[in-house]
Image: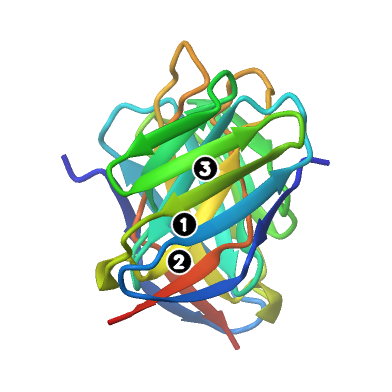
Amino acid sequence: NAGVTQTPKFQVLKTGQSMTLQCAQDMNHEYMSWYRQDPGMGLRLIHYSVGAGITDQGEVPNGYNVSRSTTEDFPLRLLSAAPSQTSVYFCASSYRSRGPNTEAFFGQGTRLTVV
Amino acid sequence: GENVEQHPSTLSVQEGDSAVIKCTYSDSASNYFPWYKQELGKGPQLIIDIRSNVGEKKDQRIAVTLNKTAKHFSLHITETQPEDSAVYFCAAKPFSGNTGKLIFGQGTTLQVKP
């Protein structure tokens, strides 16, 4: 199993450009999430999905779109990049359990710089 | 809204000493509290977790304690080693219909000096 795969690993964008960060998992997990990591602010939830066709907003959704057409893929779209979106982005997935335990498996991250 | 506060932001210890990281959460209905370790250039990885119906859990040199009344939980690392140096995140799972959603703390950078 590859686990959670994110592409690209690094990206530089100009202000106003759009792009899609890719995330794929091969563990048949129902739940997938996107987080951004900024110094001193931890991991903040952008969007999440509980299954194909279902998405919802997290703490910091503005400027980002997501869709979940398959169980495996959960792309994150930046519509019009801004310098404030310079960050490290992590995708995570977890299985749906009967109880509260829900280990999240993270990708290696995408380091995005907007100039 | 749901919030998790984590302290300290940085922690430096001598090899062999103990390290303690503390977190508080706002949602009293939170029912699951994992801890993640992030090594340089990598994604976070789960190291230990605790459910809301348990007060303490141990795994070799790592332990987590939970005080539901005070809404805080802590990570204890004993006999620290240089390979324990990393960023540690606490998290809380809100009781929101089992969505897999986690709210993370701000992170603690632990440095273990040889």
Image coordinates of residue B105 in percent, x first then y, are 63, 54
Q: Is residue A42 left or right of residue A26?
A: right
Question: Can I make out residue A105 in this image?
Answer: no
Taking depth in this image into account, of A84 and B114 the one nearest to the observer is B114
Identify the amino acid type marked 2.
Val
Q: Which chain's residue wears label 2?
A: B
- Of callouts 1 and 3, which one flags the residue occurring earlier in the amino acid sequence? 3
Q: Which residue is painted at 70% across and 76% down in the image?
A: A84
- Give the residue pinned by disc 3: A33
- Give the residue pinned by disc 1: A90
- Give the residue pinned by disc 2: B87
Camera-side mark, 1 or 2: 2
Direction top: furthest residue: A98
Q: Is residue B34 left or right of residue B45?
A: right
Taking depth in this image into account, of A37 and A7 the one nearest to the observer is A37
Q: Which chain's residue wears label 3?
A: A
Q: Is residue B34 left or right of residue B53?
A: left
The relative height of residue A58 versus residue A95 in the rendered view (above or below) is below
Image coordinates of residue A77 in percent, x first then y, are 56, 56
Q: Which residue is painted at 45% across and 71% down in the image?
A: B110
Q: CA distance from mark 3 to mark 2?
A: 20 Å
Quadrant position of residue A57:
top right
Identify the amino acid type marked 3.
Ser
